[in-house]
Amino acid sequence: MPHHLMNLRHVPDDEADEIRALFDAHEVAYYETPPSRWGISMGGFWVHDDDEAARARALLDEYQRQRYEIQRRAYEEHLARGESGGFWFMLRQRPIRTLAACVAILVIMGLSLLPFIRIG
């Protein structure tokens, strides 16, 4: 019976490439199904054998732990340098774009709620 190791929906290309290289380096007999363009099927990495699934899962868990640590450090470095942040950061960096997005959100909310407001 096939074992689904990992969902490929919203996985960056560099991460998928690293996982393929990891499986190839450790000679994991896997196969891959691509995610659909419209988000209907998830795609993923699969194996057939139970033992192979356990070995691949252990490799994948270790890889994801390491990737999490690397990405977390990079995010914290960006925050420390002031290169990323939340709403106020975006407002300071790109005020017109941020305000335009806020106005668009308010317009969409208003149009969505208008039928309900008119009922009352």
Image (cartoon, helix red, strand yellow):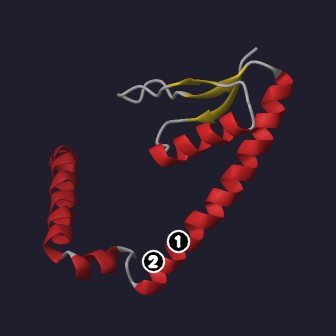
Frontmost residue, 116 versus 49: 49
How packed mark 2 is, by other alpha carbons closer than 10 Å (few <14, some 14-19, many 20 or more), is: few
Q: Is residue 120 above or below residue 106?
A: above
Residue 65 image label: none
Quadrant where the image shows the N terminus: top right
Element type at marker 2?
helix
Residue 13 drawn at (x, y percent): 46, 43
Please give left or right for residue 9 compared with residue 113 in the image.
right
Frontmost residue, 5 versus 18: 18
Residue 56 drawn at (x, y percent): 76, 35
Element type at marker 1?
helix
Callout 2 amino acid: His
Residue shown at 76%/43% (left/top)? 59
Q: Is residue 22 above or below residue 107?
A: above
Residue shown at 46%/80% (left/top)? 79
Residue 11 drawn at (x, y percent): 50, 43
Residue 74 image label: 1
Please give left or right for residue 25 compared with residue 72 in the image.
right
Number of residue marks: 2
Residue 12 visible somewhere in the drawing: no
Residue 78 image label: 2
Q: Is residue 115 above or below residue 77?
A: above
Q: Quadrant of residue 57?
A: top right
Q: Residue furthest right?
A: 51
Q: Is residue 65 above or below residue 38?
A: below
Q: Quadrant of residue 83?
A: bottom left
- The reply to whether the C-beta atoms of the residues labelled 2 and 1 are less than 8 Å apart is yes
How packed mark 1 is, by other alpha carbons closer than 10 Å (few <14, some 14-19, many 20 or more), is: few
Residue 31 drawn at (x, y percent): 62, 22
Residue 25 visible somewhere in the drawing: yes
Residue shown at 74%/18% (left/top)? 48
